[in-house]
Image (tube, rainbow, N blue to C red):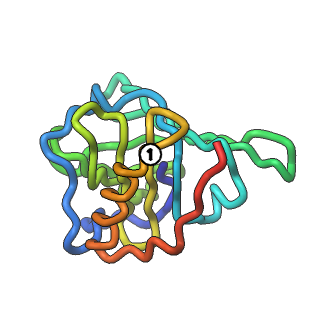
Amino acid sequence: MASAFSLKTKRTIPEGAHAVTPFDADKYLGTWYEIARFDFKFEKGLSKTTANYSLNDDGSIHVINRGYDAKKGKWKESVGKAVFVEEPDVAMLKVSFFGPFYSGYNVAALDPDYKYALVIGRNLDYMWLLSREKTMPEKVKDKYLEIAKGIGYDISRLVWVEQ
């Protein structure tokens, strides 16, 4: 899930991090459940959060982020668009939910079956663990957390999402 906003910038991935390659966007499309995240304004207090990705006619990726706000008793949704920063076989994208404002969306780890992903933003303030199911095996979770720590993320900041 990406809802972090910044002015257009060349740096879309933290120093020392690498995006998955080769990457197959068609396999990545569909619904992902958020297992954990660094909290930020849009998702603060939300549960049952998901990200759904589909292909736009122009080759960009249509993004729908959705979560439930229990305090207000209603769903919250944000719709955006993601485009590849480099070649489409490199999982380094930038996503926009508000016009010309883009932020990094980088798949830093992905299992071969495209069931689990570690997604990071353009800096160490944004990170998500995503799964095709409402849970993630501990072994996968531990592996992705080690990768994140190696990049410099403070994983103690993670919010574990109630699905």
Q: Residue furthest top?
A: 57
Left/right placement of residue 140 relative to residue 46 reads: left
Residue drawn at x 26%, y 68% is: 11
Residue drawn at x 26%, y 73% is: 150
Q: Where residue 153 appears, x then y in whole percent?
A: 38, 73
| Residue 111 higher or lower than 46, as above or below | above
Query: From the image, which quarter does the C terminus lie in?
Result: top right
The residue to which callout 1 is attached is 130
Specify the quadrant of the image occupied by residue 120.
bottom left
Amino acid beneath label 1: Leu
Which residue is at the front of the view, 162 or 76? 162
Q: Where residue 123 appears, x then y in whole percent?
A: 37, 71
Left/right placement of residue 74 relative to residue 124 reads: right
Dot 1 falls on a residue whose secondary structure is: strand
| Residue 107 higher or lower than 52, as above or below | below
Q: Label 1: few (<14), some or many (≥20) within 10 Å? A: many
Residue drawn at x 27%, y 55% is: 108
Residue drawn at x 44%, y 40% is: 131
